[in-house]
Image: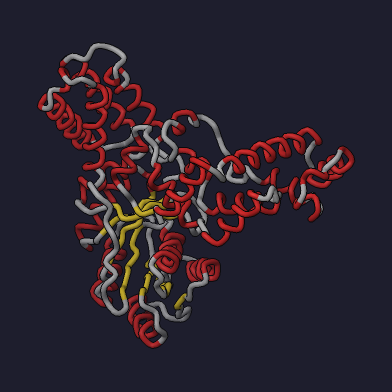
Amino acid sequence: MFDNLSSKLDKALHVLKGHGRITEVNVAETMKEVRRALLDADVNYKIAKQFTNRVKEKALGQNVLTALKPGQLMVKIVKDELTELMGGQAEGLNLTGSPTVILMAGLQGSGKTTFSGKLANWLKTKKTKQPLLVAADVYRPAAIDQLKVVGEQIGVDVYTEPDNKNPVEIAKNAIAYAKKNGKNVIIIDTAGRLAVDEDMMNEIAAIHQAVKPQETLFVVDAMTGQDAVNTAKAFNDRLDFEGVILTKLDGDARGGAALSIKSVVNKPIKFIGTGEKMTDIDVFHPDRMADRILGMGDVISLVERAQEQFDEEEARKLQKKIAKNQFGFDDFLKQIQQIKKMGNIKDLMGMIPGMGKAMKGIDIDDDAFKGIEAIIYSMTPAERRNPAIINSSRKKRIAKGSGSSVTEVNQLLKQFNQMAKMMKMMQGGKGKAMMNMFKGMR
């Protein structure tokens, strides 16, 4: 996400990072390049101009030109202003009410139904809530069936009235059902349209009036850029929603919506969608996103995702196996599964400082582990427990069974042995201290 914007901002700030003498003139020139980068990302011209003017004023006001490390100070000012532009701080959900009612609004094709499922799954796993999905889209063919499929995927009940064409009645009946069945969060998936129209606005306003939601969230496709911002404004003028959800940030999103929407509608971005899986949802942190845009990575989010998959009991068992040289391919497979649960591989790599720039133009398949898994699954249980017994004939059989070559099998065995040695070294001294520190972060 934001690859193009990150590249252009890095280029614009290059001179100010210490690769040349900094003057008031080249600060002004740099701000022109920053403004151009923002406009290319489909940020509103007025917002882009205001942003660069603020950065320039702060830079001259804080004596950047005479600072010991002027380039670093300048980048910090840009980062702080980007953070402020996107909302300043993360905004949580209002989960008061018994039950809490969340109304999802947006245009057709924005990913509203899928994100309703992601949000239900997030609430179920992160907030230990009992959510209920409500199918209130009575127009789009198969909308009810789609929500049912989503509900089955995540193990969340879906309330439907297939023969009822009145979304207001469906929403009110769903609340009564939730109260009877112990559901404490209701997520109402409403109908979208191909464009903003009066009928759509009247209907969503009627549902809003009837159910009085604690949260009305407007779902925006990040790939539509400035159009998304204009649509959000039209909805907000009528609904006065509480927050924005940006979907499809894993696609070719230029970033204009994320950077502009807070300034235009004065409502925070609360969540972002980062992939197609039901777990690909993140709370939006403006400061962390600013770091990523400037190529500084997002270590905090990376650690948080790792902690979600971290099982202390499993970690203790693994430590014992490593200490006794019993770490095998079954254990390796478990580690792969944990990494895969953390999300899109390229997205994870982009969270490591400096890696975003290094990964530019490199396409990493989300099934990057498929070949490795195929080789491991072609091994016998004995071979997975004790890789040392894998000789030439076994390698040929494993290669044939996994559709790979003996060279690829050898490469995996070599990498596995190197990793096992490294993990063994991590058991003592500094390694053990690091692992204990990691546990202490939970």
Asked whether 291 or 331 is in front, the reply is 331
Residue at image coords 19%, 51%: 266
97 in relation to 192, above or below: below
Q: Residue furthest bottom?
A: 180
Residue 68 horizontal/vertical position (percent): 20, 20
Point out residue 60 in the picture as x, y percentages from the top left corner. Answer: 12, 24
Query: x and y percent of residue 437 in the render?
Result: 42, 49
Q: Position of residue 77 (x, y in %)?
A: 21, 32
Q: Write down the quadrant of residue 26 in the picture.
A: top left
Specify the quadrant that holds the C terminus: bottom left
Task: Kindly identify the residue that appears in the image at 61 percent across and 49 percent down.
Answer: 336
Q: Quadrant of residue 314?
A: bottom right
User: From the viewer's perspective, is 255 left or right of 51?
Assistant: right
Asked whether, in this view, residue 273 is left or right of residue 344, the answer is left
Q: Residue furthest front?
A: 429
Residue ID at (46%, 50%): 436
Position above or below: 211 against 277: below
Q: Residue at x 10, y 27 (%)?
A: 61
Can residue 428 be spotted in the picture? yes
Q: Residue furthest left?
A: 61
